[in-house]
Amino acid sequence: MKVLDIPAACVDLTIIRADHHDRFQAAIEQANIKSHHYYFPRLLFSGQRERRVLLFEEVSGSILVYGLQERSSGLDLGLYVPPIPFQPTALQWALARMQEFNKGRPSRIDWVQEKEAALMAGHGFSLSLREQEFIYDRAAVVALQGPEFARVRRYLSSVKKYGDLVVRRFTQADEDGCMTLYRKFRGQLQSKGVEPKGFSAMVNCLKGATGLPLTRLQGQVFEAGGAIRAYSFGGPINSDYGCAFLTVADHDFPGLAYALRHQMMMSWPNLTYFNDSTDNNRPGLREMKQRFRPIEMHNIFKAQEVKGAARRQASL
């Protein structure tokens, strides 16, 4: 895959690599993050695309993650998330860099978690709701007690009909089998009129997952009939929140999408909550995630810098 060339104005910024995980994890822990957009493997594997690359620097004790994006109007530099952890001086530094690079155009922050929305508004940004994340009580999902989880229990019980089902940890030898399944999975979605997202992240994850410690990312595969029928990747955002990063299940094997999530949450007993990202405006996916009884629908915003007269009017 071709990667975007880095312009001279950004050569002092660093492309995120696997060996940066400790630096990011310390900052994310300090910032008390709950959004899946900050999950280090997501930053690592989603960051390198043909028309976008994620870069970072450290300023005033914060990590600044930038998105360098190729648009029809040319290259654009924005903050991917607010400073981690937030420091006003780091934000001002980032704003100055973006304004110089973008020749004065309003700066943007792609993903702002709910608790930082008012903070960004106070620093001259307007915000618009972008999506909602599903947050689960991990222990409640693992236990699956009570009538509210009856449907999930039935789906998990249905998996028993795959008598030769084997669940095991992902190894690099599984890359081709997982990719074969993913192509089938994409075709199943496309046949329903859904254009799946995240192809580059999936390819990068399958190639690079084993380069991260198991304390950061674990992959699991579900085999039946001699082939991989489902797989997932996830791990801790911080010491409280986990992230269901990538989940793929063959639609010809009902129940495995439920089993993936249940198995993942069982695999991280020290975490309290799990973030299962958004529903991508897919009604079927939304219905399934609702059946795990989220304790919170966590709002994620996009922030745009308010400039000049518009900013003065907003402050009145």
Image (spheres, helix red, strand yellow):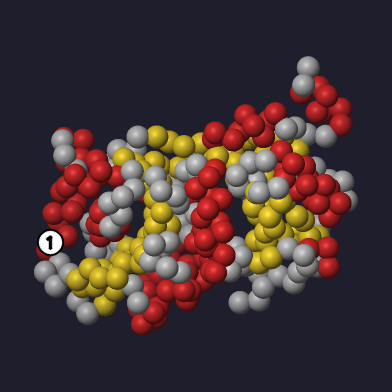
Viewed as shown, does residue 127 lie left or right of 257?
Answer: right
Q: Residue furthest front?
A: 61
Quick one: 186 or 47, which is closer to the camera? Answer: 47
Residue 186 x, y percent position in the rendering: 43, 66
What amino acid does circle 1 point to? Lys
Quick one: 224 or 267, which is closer to the camera? Answer: 267
Instruction: Look at 64% across and 52% down and name the residue there.
Output: 63
Q: How many marks on residues?
A: 1
- Does residue 132 lie above or below 10 as drawn? above
Residue 272 x, y percent position in the rendering: 33, 43
Residue 130 in sight in this render: no
Quick one: 63 or 284, which is closer to the camera? Answer: 63
Give the residue number, with chain letter if any, for mark 1. 160
- Does residue 69 lie above or below 307 as drawn? below
Instruction: Look at 39% across and 79% down and name the residue there.
Output: 172
Residue 228 x, y percent position in the rendering: 29, 74
Query: Secondary structure beneath disc 1?
Result: helix
Q: Which part of the image, by quadrant, shows the C terminus?
A: top right
Residue 112 in sight in this render: yes
Q: Which part of the image, by quadrant, shows the N terminus?
A: bottom right
Quick one: 86 or 126, which is closer to the camera? Answer: 86
Residue 99 x, y percent position in the rendering: 83, 48
Instruction: Look at 53% across and 49% down and name the residue there.
Output: 28
Instruction: Look at 61% across and 33% down and name the residue there.
Output: 117
